Structure formats: C-alpha cells, structure tokens
Image (tube, rainbow, N blue to C red):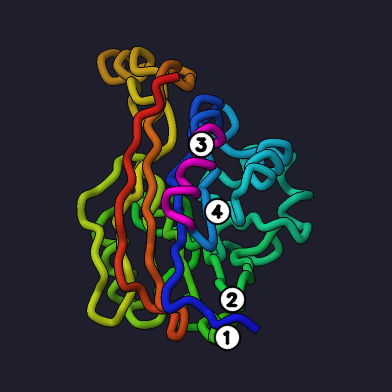
C-alpha cells in the first residue's frame, strides 16, 4: 500500500450564484484542480438556481463536474425539488443545526487515498433564520466525526460569530470557512491549534452586480424603498474560493490561500 502524503489540499469555492456562477465554476474547475491538485473539492451551492436555492439537476451537474460535496445555507429549502436528493446518499448537505425531521442531513463523510474527511454545514443565529446554537450543537455532536478530519462551512451573517466559531473549534477541525455574505474577506489565517479560518470566502457569480444580483434592481430598492423581485445579473463572473493545506496524520491545517479569479466570458 503506498504511503500517504504528508499533506493534502481542500479546494473550497464560495456561494455559486445563478447560471453565470455555475458556468464560471464548471469552466474554471478543471484548471483550478490541475493547479492546486486538491484531494477534495467542496462548493457552496445554495444560490445556484436563479440566485436562490438549488435544484436536483443543478446539484447533479456540479457533482458530475468534479465537485466532491455541496454545502447549502439558509436558502436550502427554497426549491423543494431538492428534497429527494437531500434524502439520498448524494454528497449534498444542508445546515445541521436546524429542527429535527427536516429533509436531508447536516454532514457527509468523504474518503479518498486513506483520508476520511467530514464536511459539516452549520448556520449562524445572528440576523439569520431560527436555528439551534451552533456552538453548543458542535459540542453535543463532536463524537460523530472523531474518526477523521473535519471541514465546517459556517453559513452566517456576522463576522464576529464566524470568527468566534473558529476559535471555539480551534484544534478540533481542519477549517472553518464562512459563507453567506458573498463578500470575500481578507482575514484568512491558521489559528494556534491548527484550524484554518476565513470569515467569508466570497461568491462565484456575476462581477458587475450587488451580491450577484442585478445592481439596478437593488439600487431601486435602496432609493425607493419598495419591494422588487431580485434578478441574477449577467456578464463576467468572479470566482472566489480558498485552498486549505491539511496535515494528513492529524487533520490540522498548515496553511490557507485565498483564490479570486475573474472569468471574462
């Protein structure tokens, strides 16, 4: 049996927004994987269908394109078509700290080359939909993934809550990657216990937009104060993500590199 490498990489791509985001990810994913040679590729897909939610067809397309697991967020249930896939053995997860009895599961275990990685999806509580306390929820369920390494997609609004969770699990997870705001932050670091933290990884979606949405629609809402249906913007996309280097022997991070690319198509 061949020896394990001393470290391996995880490629994490931020919230995919609509068709432009999907197309950009599928176009650039092969070159990203060739460059960074990740053992695992994780994508947050909660806005992949018209900017809100995800469908089974879209999820399957992402998984077929080379994505190992899809995480979701507060829009996980906006397209009920996804429920059957969430209840299957497909590698797609919604926030774990929700009410019991809902479709789907909150974590998935991936295994490659002797590495066992649990991908856990949690959601924050500040300015978000009601959910269980993610800090206590983690403590109560930690034994579920003791056998292997752990990556957390923390889907939350407030930077302080995301950083706090990073410190809370430092030494108990390889990485805590923040999603939801669509705005990439400049605070990627590895904490003393070996947990890589990034407050928000950003989005994969239209560049000339407001959080992936048509900027004119959003500006009219700010200026006029009247509700209006959001529309996914068109044009070139930005691809935001991170590459986390992890020690194979202990499942702790040795580094984290932020990715931000502009797709011209």
Q: Earlier in the sequence, mark 4 or mark 3?
A: 3
Q: Rounded to the nearest whole Å, what is the CA distance between mark 4 and mark 1?
A: 21 Å
Q: Which residues are magenta?
A: 26-37
Q: Are marks 2 and 1 in contact (CB under 8 Å)?
A: yes
Quadrant the N terminus occupies:
bottom right
Q: Main secondary structure of the magenta part?
A: helix
Please determine whether, in this image, residue 43 is positioned above or below residue 227. Answer: below
Question: SS of the residue at dot 2?
Answer: strand
Q: Mark 4 — residue?
A: 71
Task: Name the mark nearer the viewer: 4 or 3.
Answer: 3
Q: Rounded to the nearest whole Å, what is the CA distance between mark 3 and mark 2?
A: 25 Å
* Label 1: few (<14), some (14–19) or many (≥20) C-alpha neighbours in 10 Å: few
Q: Rounded to the nearest whole Å, what is the CA distance between mark 3 and mark 1?
A: 31 Å
Q: Earlier in the sequence, mark 2 or mark 4?
A: 4
Q: Rounded to the nearest whole Å, what is the CA distance between mark 2 and mark 4?
A: 17 Å
Residue 58 image offset from top left, x and y in percent: 67, 37
Task: Name the mark nearer the viewer: 2 or 4.
Answer: 2
Residue 129 image offset from top left, x and y in percent: 47, 51
Residue 65 location, quadrant: top right
Q: Are marks 4 and 1 in contact (CB under 8 Å)?
A: no
Question: SS of the residue at dot 4?
Answer: strand
Q: Mark 3 — residue?
A: 25
Q: Is residue 110 magenta?
A: no
Q: Rounded to the nearest whole Å, what is the CA distance between mark 4 and mark 3?
A: 15 Å
Q: Mark 1 — residue?
A: 147
Could you tell whether 197 is left or right of 235 in the image?
left
Please determine whether, in this image, residue 5 is positioned above or below residue 97. Answer: below
Quadrant the C terminus occupies:
top left
Residue 37 image offset from top left, x and y in percent: 48, 56
């Amino acid at each position: 049996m061949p020896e394990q490498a001393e470290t391996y990489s995880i490629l994490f791509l931020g919230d995919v927004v609509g068709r432009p985001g999907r197309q950009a990810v599928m176009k650039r994913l092969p070159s990203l994987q060739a460059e960074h040679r990740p053992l695992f590729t994780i994508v947050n897909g909660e806005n992949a269908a018209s900017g809100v939610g995800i469908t089974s067809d879209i999820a399957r397309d992402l998984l077929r394109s080379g994505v190992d697991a899809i995480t979701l967020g507060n829009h996980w249930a906006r397209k009920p078509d996804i429920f059957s896939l969430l209840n299957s053995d497909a590698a797609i997860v919604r926030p774990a700290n929700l009410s019991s009895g809902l479709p789907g599961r909150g974590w998935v275990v991936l295994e490659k080359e002797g590495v066992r990685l649990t991908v856990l999806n949690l959601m924050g509580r500040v300015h978000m939909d009601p959910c269980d306390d993610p800090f206590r929820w983690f403590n109560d369920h930690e034994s579920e993934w003791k056998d292997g390494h752990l990556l957390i997609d923390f889907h939350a609004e407030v930077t302080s809550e995301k950083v706090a969770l990073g410190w809370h699990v430092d030494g108990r997870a390889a990485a805590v990657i923040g999603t939801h705001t669509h705005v990439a932050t400049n605070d990627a670091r590895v904490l003393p216990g070996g947990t890589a933290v990034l407050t928000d990884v950003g989005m994969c979606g239209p560049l000339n937009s407001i959080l992936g949405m048509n900027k004119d629609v959003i500006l009219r809402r700010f200026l006029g104060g009247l509700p209006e249906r959001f529309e996914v913007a068109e044009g070139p996309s930005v691809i935001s993500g991170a590459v986390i280097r992890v020690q194979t022997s202990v499942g702790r991070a040795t580094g984290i590199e932020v990715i931000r690319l502009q797709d011209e198509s």
